[in-house]
Image (cartoon, helix red, strand yellow):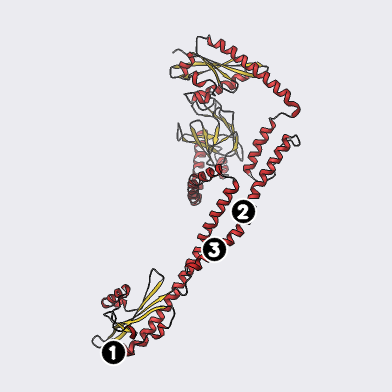
Amino acid sequence: MSFAKLIVVAGPNKGAAYFLNEGENTLGRGEDNAIVLSSGKVSKKHCTLMVGKQKVELVDNGSSNGTFVNGVLVKKKILQNREKISVGPFVLEFLQATKQLAKVHSDLQGIGAIGATDAIGASIDNNLSMDNSLKSANDNSQGILAKYKRKFDDLALPVFYDFHTRHDWATILVSMFVIFVVMNLGFTVYPVLEKSREEVLREAEARAIYIANQIANLNRNYIAENKEAYLSVEFAEADLNVKEAVIINLESRIMAPGTRLNESYNHPYVLKYRELIKKDQRFWKTIKHREENDTVVVVSPIMVLSKAKGINVPGAIAVVVFSTAGVALDSGTIGVIYFEAFCYSLLIGVVFLYLAFQVTMHPLRVLNDNMDSVLKGNAESVEKKFQNEALDQLIDTINSALSRIPKNDETATTVAATDNEQLIADNLIKSIQMMAEKLPFPAMILDGELRVKFLNSAFEEVSGIHAMNAVGDVIDNVSRDEAFPGLIKDLVSKAINTPNEGVSEEYEFSSGNHKITATAISGLPGKVEVHLFVAEKVEG
């Protein structure tokens, strides 16, 4: 046996729990049900839960307002753990224990009914709690994915659906493909180019640091001996990627190269570095700096011995400005790379786009041909040939519709019979209407499809339904009270089983409690054409 229970999670009686017994468990507003839900929107025997050894199956009993599982209308469904069942204003969560509970049940044979029920309920709750703990991480991740999926469905899909109403499927497919190619280039080629740029900058930094240190080492002795005429940066200037190589003193005066001797050096970063090395020994080292135009600036102190302090101190600064323009990709080259990637993606994508279009359209062409064969009488029904759930549902609907179309040799007879039946139904409704107009109490007439055909003034006053707006429309659309159509459908289902005899049930209008009697009236044998409803006020 599969142990399970229902918990009301929304609506009246929220928090109430109902344990399911093995076998049939009926649910409805009638007092004789295993689970009683008191509401006018719940049928007397709304649905049944069949509890077996391995599964629990929900069966709708032809209820007026229907039974929903996770928001989907169902007639019959095998329930899964934690699914939500909607019945009228009630939302019930289905909770089912695992096989571990079978052992618990065998241990409870000697316990009384109340004790056993409590123990089983506790076991279910404990089992579900353990299950929740084990699945919490997975549920969280699924919850995040579901959240973003809902946002995407709410924001993006309506745009495509609207686009589809104005453009054909091929245009939509091509548009989505172009968007994909452009986004693909951005998310694949761009990171590669950025990685390449970063590697170029790292190589430029290493090269600039080496050159700055070489300048400092080669000119250290000349700085110490104050031989400025011997200072040289020629080997650095010979490097094609070196924009600038200078030696400056601590007052920012250029000491080398000789062509710029005694000029004031005003690079902002170098001036900042000069002030730092005067105040803090931590900056007596080679330091690199990247500028916005992918240029690298490296400063290296030229250390000399200070006789006063007895330590090496900065006597001058070697500055190297290294450009990556010669080794980095320029904008033209990057444009060529993007263009080549786009062409290759487009070439490959066109092939797959064509395949996707044909794979999508082929089942629809086959469906059209099969429908034509059925309509010509060459086949009984449309066959399901492709693994496509949405298409299978469409084929089921088409087969259902095709089955109602009469064959060629039956058409004339069927049309004539239909016209004759409609004439009989119209005459019957007129006759009943003439009779109802003379009734002193509230009366209403519905046709076989529950469309309002007549209301007298007394029924208008009691129900609040006005004939001017209601006649010709179904009762669901015109009733001011949401529970009233459910009652009407309940009475109709009972009256059909006893045609030309009345069935009654009490209903409370705003003006008071009334006994409503419904009579199903047949025009042709076995076919109900008219439903007559008469309301009589219940005193007291």
Q: Secondary structure at mark 2?
A: helix
Evaluate whether residue 526 shows in this view.
Answer: no
Circle 3/circle 2 CB separation < 8 Å: no
Q: Secondary structure at mark 1?
A: loop
Mark 3 or mark 2, which has the lower sequence index? 3
Q: Amino acid at mark 1?
A: Asn
Check residue 171 in the rendering and tell me which mark sits there, or answer none.
none
Label 2: how many residues lie within 10 Å, few (<14), some (14-19) or many (20+)? some
| Residue 395 % position (x, y) | 66, 39
The answer for how far apart the CA atoms under marks 2 and 1 are is: 75 Å
71 w.r.t. 343: above or below: above
The residue wearing badge 2 is: 353
> Which image quadrant for residue 400?
top right
Mark 2 or mark 1, which has the lower sequence index? 1
The residue wearing badge 3 is: 339
> Which image quadrant for residue 251?
bottom left
Q: Which one is in front, 20 or 416? A: 416
Q: Amino acid at mark 2?
A: Leu
Q: Which one is in front, 419 or 326? A: 326
| Residue 38 % position (x, y) | 49, 27
Q: Amino acid at mark 3?
A: Phe
273 w.r.t. 450: above or below: below
Q: Which one is in front, 352 or 19? A: 352
Q: Secondary structure at mark 3?
A: helix
The residue wearing badge 1 is: 226
